[in-house]
Image: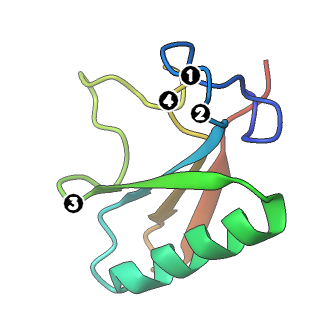
Amino acid sequence: MATCLSREADSSNSSSAPKLHLITYLCPDFPLELFQTYQHYLEEVLSCESFLMVESRWGAPPAGKTDPFTANEVDIGMSLDGLSRLNFVEASAE
């Protein structure tokens, strides 16, 4: 998967720059501001804009729903494992 550094701009709007797509899954132990801090940091170091999607219903892509990683809809996901550690998942380049 391409990142905001190599993803093509939205074809419906030729003036739009590529954007980094982030998602966080149900993480009740961490405030939303933490993920927004990561978002702003990545925008700064990668020199690009980003979107942060917040999924509050599930801790990971649920069975039977479209997986945003395999659907090429997100670049980086943030979720918790069973030990309450924050995990980052980057979509693999294809």
* Residue 52, image x, y percentages: 44, 57
Amino acid type at circle 1 is Asp
Counting residues from the N terminus, which is met first, the one under dot 4 or under dot 3?
Answer: 3
Q: In this figure, which residue is indicated by the disc labeled 4?
A: 73
Using the image, tell me which numbered label, if any, was put on residue 10. Answer: 1
Q: CA distance from mark 3 to mark 1?
A: 27 Å
As displayed, is residue 51 above or below residue 14?
Answer: below
Counting residues from the N terminus, which is met first, the one under dot 4 or under dot 2?
Answer: 2
Q: In this figure, which residue is indicated by the disc labeled 3?
A: 56
Q: In this figure, which residue is indicated by the disc labeled 2?
A: 16
* CB-based contact (under 8 Å), mark 1 and mark 2: yes
Of badges 4 and 1, nearer the viewer stands 1
Toward the viewer: 5 or 35?
5
Counting residues from the N terminus, which is met first, the one under dot 4 or under dot 1?
Answer: 1
Of badges 4 and 3, nearer the viewer stands 4
Counting residues from the N terminus, which is met first, the one under dot 2 or under dot 3?
Answer: 2
Q: CA distance from mark 4 to mark 3?
A: 17 Å
Amino acid type at circle 4 is Glu
